[in-house]
Image: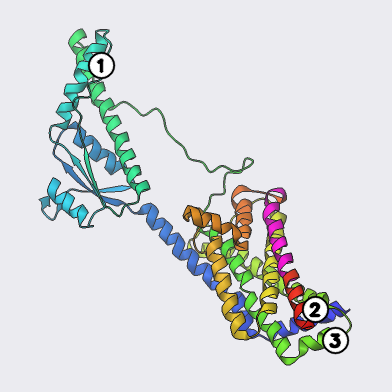
Amino acid sequence: MRLLASVHKEFLVLIRDIPGLAVLFLMPLAMIIVVTLVQDNTMQNIKESQIEVLFVDNDHDILGQTVRNGLQKSKLFHIVEKSGQEKFDSLSAKSAVAAGKYKLAVIIPKNASQVLRAKLKPLVQGVLKGQSPENDTSTKVNIRIFTDPSLKETFRQAVITSLNAYTSKIENRILFKILGEEIAAITGIEPKTENEPAELIHFTETPAFEGNDISITPNSVQHNVPAWALFAMFFIVIPMAGNMIKERDDGSFFRLMTMPGNYFTVIGSKLIVYLGVTLIQFVLMLLVGIYILPAFGLPVLQLGTHIFALFFMGLLSGVAAVGYGILVGTLTHTHEQAGVFGSVSVIILAALGGVWYPVYAMPDMMQKIAIISPLNWGLTGFYKIFLRNSGFSEILPQALMLFAFAALCMIMAFFYQKLKRSL
């Protein structure tokens, strides 16, 4: 009965704080819609955008043509050969890249195809005569690549790797053509070599999931829904701490402590009421991901196949958020302290935990620091459920860490409160 009365009191205090309720429910809903739309458009722009590449073909033969065709077929590059009506040459291309107007330039040297033919023809003739071919490294075709110094090393290496792949195809094409010519000289039969050799190997990418369900693919919705649900849950620290300070200021908390019952009855009522609020927030976020975000042209949130594990993770995340709110409300003495410390600390934990920026895209040092954030534990658990179809056993480590965090916060709040009463 004492616990029920305390719960009823907390509920009345909560529903009378209309601005606080608006912050708890409307702000996260607006944030999840806006941020998801922005991130999804950004991701689509990155996928659809092409890097402009200055292309200078001094060869005007098979090498230059094949490199140009390879770059044009790629979804990464857009070839630029002219500035207005004037074609770029080596010097002007280098100057344009150095000035930051373009990210890179590819320069095909003069007579490069002839050099390749001169090197490959003796090789083919030796093979047809049964001789062991010798690699002649005295002369090489040097394709120059000018890069913007601000380019990341990983992107620079990706470009060079792509160009190496194109040049390998060129060598095979020239070998194929020379081989046909030599066979024609021996047999008198003119082969048809207009087409390149067909590509017999193809790479197919498929996201890996446990079991046979491969229909779920990572997207902006499956990141932002759990991320902002966690942020909304932990933001409960502000109204919760504010109500605890108000109780201390008007003497309500002191009167409650002098009545029959104990400290855990008072704290338990707060845990029950505010945990209910976090669960409502969580459900609303899921509904936004399922029904509202698709109305803006975004993907539908896929919940995975373990619904009970999903709500168990949401429950433990709410417990951790309420536990943190109790600790902040106990340690702070004014509304200003609670508001500033509570909001700033939650924003820092969210940034570290991957709410604002995915952890996998952070530097290595920040990825190691991210594991101290309880929001990172919750987000990892939701990723496992949404993206890997994980169940209770897989999310248990994250769930236990959230529970331990909540327990630690409430124990610290209890002993701090006990220390204050003894002074």
- Residue placed farthest to the front in the image? 423
Does residue 300 show up?
no
The label nearer to you, 3 versus 2, is: 3
Q: Position of residue 145 (x, y in %)?
A: 23, 43
Q: Position of residue 44 (x, y in %)?
A: 41, 56
Quadrant assignment for the N terminus:
bottom right
Q: Is residue 112 above or below residue 87?
A: above
Q: Is residue 126 above or below residue 51?
A: above
Q: Is residue 177 above or below residue 409?
A: above
Residue highlighted by disc 3: 258
Q: Upstream in the sequence, badge 1 or badge 3?
A: 1
Q: Is residue 154 above or below residue 170?
A: below
What range of the chain is rendered magenta?
A: 393-410
Residue 408 belongs to the span the image colors magenta: yes
Residue 198 belongs to the span the image colors magenta: no
Q: Upstream in the sequence, badge 3 or badge 2?
A: 3
| Residue type for callout 1 | Glu
Tag 2 secondary structure: helix
Residue highlighted by disc 1: 134
Residue highlighted by disc 2: 266
